[in-house]
Amino acid sequence: MIDSPDPLARIMERVPPPVEAVNGSGDWGAAERALGTPLPDDFKRVVAAYGRGDFWGALCLCTPFGDDNPVRLRADLLEDFGPSRDRWPEKYPYPLFPEPGGLLAWAVTDTGTHLCWLTVGPPASWPVVIWSRDDAYERFDCGVAAFLEEWLSGRLTSELLPADPDLAPWFDAAVDRDHIYLQLDEGPLPYPERLRILREALGPTADRGSYEYQGSRQDHFVVTETGWQLTYETAYGHQLRVAFPPADSARARDTVLAALARMGCAVQSVSPVHGTSSWA
């Protein structure tokens, strides 16, 4: 157990960083000049450790590096939301950077929420403001690393950025993945037994959440040694969705098909949804 006052050290103990941080390094001086402001040191250290990717399947860090970075750290909130603010100023209680003391986004979520700095005073003292797509706001008087450590530990209370206390936090680096969908027949076993066999065959695995409604189920999990992401479900037909780095295609195919055979489920069709892999 790490006993450290450093929030990043505690984050890294709870959520191991990737072997390589995608878009995690570059010329910070040039990035700050392009933005027109220095940036907090704790944020730079978080980016260097984790890079682009998402925490808990929800919060994606914006980094200033990478030509192909779709969530690049930019000073674009004023450009994007200025016209809307002109029409509905009551929805915008804070200035928008590069206006003095304006909001500057350092992360976005899967629901369109922005996590911002309120750029008042020196960067080391900038608080965090959560800004939802419904124009609700929450302010936290701490830096990025302390905010993430509180959130990932479950100690932070936020209506705009909820956390699932039943799931251990994780980080997925933003690496390219191919996606394959396999339609299956039902086989002789009930769903819970099929799921158990699947996860044992692929294991060790870690939960990434589940869903059940009116008899339909979705179970999300990841193979911890390879990072393969899987969804086993009956919500959209009986199928298995698999996402994996392209270099793992042959290994993933052989491993997954062997697991399905153990489940007693015949493959009815295989559909490459994204990427170049084909398991036909």
Image (tube, rainbow, N blue to C red):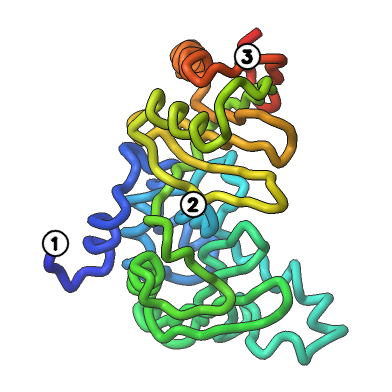
Q: CA distance from mark 1 to mark 3?
A: 47 Å
Report the residue marked by disc 2.
Answer: 54
Q: Mark 1 packing: few (<14 Cα in 10 Å), some, or many (20+)?
A: few
Q: Amino acid at mark 3?
A: Ala
| Residue 2 numbered tag | 1
Q: Quadrant of the N terminus?
A: bottom left
Q: Quadrant of the C terminus?
A: top right
Residue in the image at 61% along x and 11% along y: 279
- The local secondary structure at tag 3 comes to loop
Residue in the image at 62% along x and 47% along y: 70
The answer to whether residue 247 is visible is no
Q: Amino acid at mark 1?
A: Ile
* Residue 140: quarter of image: bottom left
Q: Mark 2 packing: few (<14 Cα in 10 Å), some, or many (20+)?
A: many
Residue 195 image offset from top left, x and y in percent: 50, 33
Report the residue marked by disc 3.
Answer: 266
Q: CA distance from mark 1 to mark 2?
A: 23 Å
